[in-house]
Image (cartoon, grey):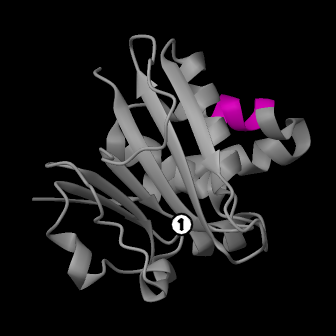
Amino acid sequence: MEEKEFRILSRGGQGAVTAAQILVEAAVIGNKYAQAVPNFGQERKGAPVYTFARLSNEPIQSHTYVYEPDIVVMFDPFLMELGINPLEGIKYNSILIINDKELPDKLGDKFKKVGLLDAWGITHEMIGNVPPNAAMLGAIAKTTGLLEIEHIMEAIVDTMGEKIGKINAKCAKEAYERTVIYER
């Protein structure tokens, strides 16, 4: 696999920074190189948060933010109403993973592949009122095919601990199964 760059868009308190860290750990479990580059911005709940990650089979040389992502992950589609453009700098044939009940019209034809998941719904159903990061990790694994869901689940348990991690890992697996893929 050539290096793949992620831009993860969320709001403070939605768990995207933790998701990027778990994504990196899952990649390492799968014998890949990976890095997460968080950008906390205003550091308050609800404020826009940009988090970046890279995955590769080779050592990663760049340590900057991601300006031209291969993969965009949107934890919250409302960010577009705040003026955040998920299309900014995307490469040709980019992938979108979005937490929503339906595909926004203005995004569907701009990406080669879209993974759609109601991550809030699955998270509330399985765990309760907590961030949807585990569900989004399941959607990332399903949509990109870059990581095994088993590695995601193992990384979740390693990061969150046995008790909390097990239910979050189950949530990630369920999200993996429920993610709907659109390709053009």
Check residue 171 for magenta coloring: no
Q: Dot 1, crowdedness within 10 Å: few (<14), some or many (≥20)? A: many
Residue 44: name its quadrant. bottom right
- 22 is higher (above) or lower (below) than 128: above
- Point out residue 42 in the picture as x, y percentages from the top left corner: 72, 68
Residue position for label 1: 75
From the image, give the main secondary structure of the stretch colored magenta: helix
Nearer the observer, 171 or 129: 129
Nearer the observer, 159 or 5: 5
Q: Does residue 171 show up?
A: no
Which residue is at 72% across, 65% downward? 131
Which residue is at 57% across, 66% downward? 10
> Which secondary structure lies at badge 1?
loop
Check residue 155 for magenta coloring: yes
Q: Quadrant of the N terminus?
A: top left
Residue 23: name its quadrant. top right
**Numbered disc total:** 1
Q: Quadrant of the C terminus?
A: bottom left
Going by the numbered disc 1, the residue's amino acid type is: Phe
Which residue is at 77% across, 74% downward? 45
Question: As drawn, is 43 to the left or to the right of 117?
Answer: right
